[in-house]
Amino acid sequence: GDYANGTIYMDDGETFDYKNGQYFYWGFIYKKEGDHLHSISSKNLDKGGKLESDAIIEKIVIRGVRYYPTNVHIYLDDWNPETADYTHDRDAQTLIIRKPNALLTQEFRIDIHM
């Protein structure tokens, strides 16, 4: 596909501290940018949420990827591209990006060049 999105909300799950901003609410978008480029990006959807988290994204699985990417780049804090570790299963049409080292509460972008 050409577009998908999702969100994640987290608080401590035990108290009402979310009323004092102890939560986060982030969005993720996968979209086709051009004939040979797809991207994944993250964005803070509620700046009122102040919960700090050290949760790291372990892997990203994208289904419906027919062709092996020529490269995958991750842009983190300094927005300098880093080459991502990825595998592609042509039969399953699945792309797996392993250990992008992005925090759940960190803006990032991943470019997938086809």
Image (tube, rainbow, N blue to C red):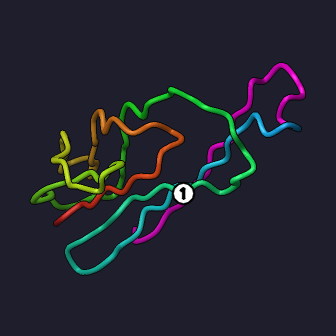
Identify the element where label 1 is drawn.
strand
The verdict on residue 25 being magenta is no
**In this picture, residue 83 sits left or right of residue 97:** left
Q: Residue at x 50, y 28 (%)?
A: 55
**In this picture, residue 52 sits left or right of residue 102:** right
In the foreground, 110 or 51: 51
For the N terminus, the image quarter is: bottom left
Specify the amino acid type for callout 1: Lys
What percent of the width, then of the height, locates residue 85? 18, 39
34 over 7 or under it: above or below: below
Residue occupied by mark 1: 43
Residue 87 occupies quadrant: top left
In the foreground, 90 or 48: 48
The verdict on residue 7 being magenta is yes
Q: Residue at x 85, y 29 (%)?
A: 17
What percent of the width, then of the height, locates residue 112? 24, 60
48 over 12 or under it: above or below: below
Q: Residue furthest front?
A: 78
Q: Residue furthest top?
A: 14
User: What segment carries the magenta color?
Assistant: 1-18
What percent of the width, then of the height, locates residue 47? 69, 53
Q: How would you rate the neighbour count of disc 1 (Cα within 10 Å): few for under 14, some for 14-19, many for 20 or more?
A: some
Q: Residue furthest left?
A: 70
For the C terminus, the image quarter is: bottom left
Q: Residue at x 44, y 30 (%)?
A: 56
What percent of the width, then of the height, locates residue 75? 29, 53
Q: Residue at x 36, y 44 (%)?
A: 61
> How many numbered marks are there?
1
44 over 15 or under it: above or below: below
